[in-house]
Image (cartoon, coloured by chain):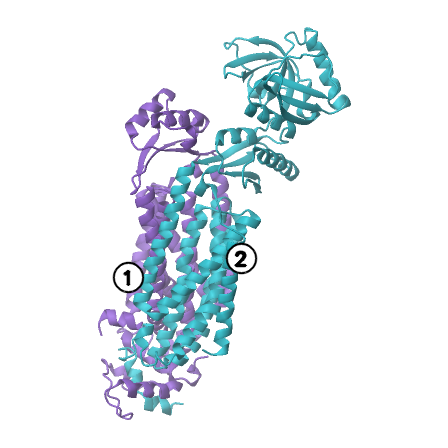
Amino acid sequence: MSIAGRLYSGNPGFDFRRAWGKALIISVVLVAICVASLAIRGLELGIDFEGGGVWEVPSADLSVEETRDALRPIDRHDARIQELTSAAGSRTIRVQAGVDAVDDSDEIVGALAEAAGTSPDQVSINTVGPTWGDEITGAAERALIYFFIAIAAYLSIRLEWRMAAGALVAVVHDIAVTVGVYSLFQFTVTPATVIAFLTILGYSLYDTVVVFDKVKESTHLVGTSTKMTYTDMANYATNEVFMRSVNTTITSLLPIVSILLVGSLLLGATTLQEFGIALAIGLAVGAYSSLFVAVPAVTWLKERESQFAEISRKLGGNRSTPVEATEVAGMASAGRKAARDDAKTARQSRTSSSPDRAGPAAPTPRVTPTLTHPPRPRKKGKRR
Amino acid sequence: MRRQELVPLLAIVIVTAAALIYTFAAGNQPLLGLDLQGGVSVVLQPTDPASDEDLDQSINIMRRRVDALGVAEPEVARQGDTIIVQLPGVDEPQRALDLIGQTAELRFRPVLEEVGPDVELTEPEDDIAEDEVVLAGDDSVGVERHYRMGPTALTGSGISGAEALYNQQALEWLVQVDLKSGAEGIEPFNELASACFARQPQCPTGQLGIVLDGAVISAPVFQEPQFDDAVTITGNFDQEGAQDLALVLRFGALPVELETQQTQTVSATIGRDALDAGIVAGLVGVVLVAIYMIAYYRLLGIVAMLSLGVSFALLWSIISWLGEAQGLALTLAGVTGLIVAVGVSVDSNVVYFENVKEDVREGRPVRSSVERSFKTAFSTIVKADVTTLIGAGLLYWLTIGPVRGFALYLGLATILDLIVSYYLMRPFVIGLGRSHRLRGRPGWLGIPATEPVAGAAPSVREPATLGGGR
């Protein structure tokens, strides 16, 4: 079956175990780059954090140069002046200056209004004192710490502490990468960005919880009778949940892509867009980390648990040639559906060309020697 | 459809319809934040640590000042140690800001002389009530004048009320100030009045300097030596000037000195643009999601969109109600929260549908898959949604500014997602799963069931062995 077909059917049959090693390298490199960038370049903080002011005046024809000239008499010509144009054709001139300009706000408004030939009411002003940013940052940091504690507690209760740990590792990874991208490209960090970071936390966790729930549900598959180690099972569960992750990410990304598009086309570089960039990056990273960071982290922890370590040892520990993914999926299905062969044969007779129940004519995939003696499912493998 | 599906389905349809009818009948509409309709927002912080009492009192005074301005839906609120003033739709932001922010003590000082503009002004930190000071003020035509003034005779605490009046005979605006009786008000004032009226050395100009926040707001001349309990201040006021002065005098000074941390003025045009962009972004997002969901899940995709529609209708009713009854405004951050919530809501559908597909893939008929899968899926949805709710709740309690609005609407949308998943998505999908017309056409539900999956094949091959294992 084609890749698309397997994806559509919901079981891509990937061998995630092979990818985990590469993912670890990629993630470590990514996070290292991001941390290095943060340390060296730092973040471009917006006026809400640094203090300063932004003045915006709508004007159809005022140029950046004219604005600069208009600000010259009040010694503000060194301010950052931008022109924002929307698809609808409306233009806005935006002037941004540091905290020392806040006291001259009235003069700047006057100069802008005059240059644009409009009334001062049309000038939008946003000035921020130097200490306000500390307040916001402090509140955000506090919220973040409590958030981590609360989530860790909740996931420990509903799932287990190893999964809580895995989820937090994934979330920290996502935040590090997203913040790193902001640092690398020197995008301005605004309160909207902070909101976006917080949303990413939510999304990343949501996705991770969905994946973990599947892993937990499949844990009963691990055993010597099913010839499945915890790692095999995790791989199987990840396959099962893969399309869910892909689809939830796509459906979450679509509105955000539209925020980005509309934000840049209709509004110029403003709140919506600042928000969109962080979200788009964070979402993509969040989906990746649920599958490639959170799951291997939990697997690593679980394989160190005595019962699972024992199973791995009995099954040959780190097998040099990992079992084919499709095979594992098959084993897993077998294990889970021990009690459901009736339904299966019924379907089989419906769908296969031969109605003969005893003669399974279904095309069989490559079968490796490990499967020549079909695994005996554990009885408690029934789904609850 | 059976009763156990029909009842919740009917219930949520009725509730939604009732909510919408109520919203329209009551004329409820979302209250737009000032970043969406234009207006002013200021964050003020005490310069020195202030007690809770002082802050609350400041808020009361500011609230009365704001109310007197006639702003629709003003908001003066405390957040931690800061005060946030939101004035949506204000025409003259600067005037409003000046009026609200006037914080320093109100003082009546005798004017010793008017000095030239070259005389240096007293620095704010040297502006002590008992000392002689040189302060500046604009006269009625906007020319800056410098006044040398004597020690304070009376502060704003001596005033019991003030009102702007129009004098029909003189055709001018004046401010009538009511003073408290006795030593707290009228006595020291009359002492100053007689001294000024007689042009005594402590008040040679006969002028009373009304000083607020270190600036001379007005310097009227005493026309009488004695007053009963009310003083009339005239001085070429226009209507606005008289009303503003009366406001300041009436409500007195704030008990703490406040420093502006952040001011944000959004012009109506820019606010409108932001709102439009938010709406367009939301619509485009929903359309994109709808196309994807229907392409991938067919009929189930339509169910997802119905869920989204019902969620949105309920959310709209709640937001409108919050706006009308609680004065809670929808800000741009809130709008983004809502757009993001579209993703969250659709996610729950995906979790369920993929569970159904998985069950069908394992050989279960669609009919029973939809029921079984819901239990597993809903447990996942609850876990994931509770995680989001914990986040939203903490953000709401612990943060300030725009993050709160975002957290509130995200949290609301998440709760609605749980309700709609259970009362709408579940009965709908189970009903579809049972439908006779759909039997044998799983493709309509986006379920490819005609061909066994590669991974599932070995298990299909083994029924005999597996059966033996039972």
Identify which residue, A8 or B443, lies in the foreground.
B443
Q: Is residue B202 left or right of residue A330?
A: right
Q: Which chain is cyan?
A: B
x and y percent of residue A15 in the render? 28, 70
Label 1 secondary element: helix
* Residue at 45 percent of width and 61 percent of height: B311
Q: Is residue B435 left or right of residue B40?
A: left
Q: What is the number of the mark on residue A234?
A: none
x and y percent of residue B312 in the render? 44, 58
x and y percent of residue A9 in the render? 29, 73
Which quadrant does the N terminus of chain B fall into? bottom left
- Give the residue type at disc 1: Lys
Residue position for label 2: B22
The reply to whether residue B129 is visible in this rendering is no
Mark 2–mark 1 distance (CA, rounded to whole Å): 57 Å
- Location of residue B224 (image quadrant): top right
* Residue at 30 percent of width and 45 percent of height: A265
Within 10 angstroms of label 2, few (less than 14), some, or many (20 or more) residues? some
Q: Is residue B467 above or below residue B187?
A: below
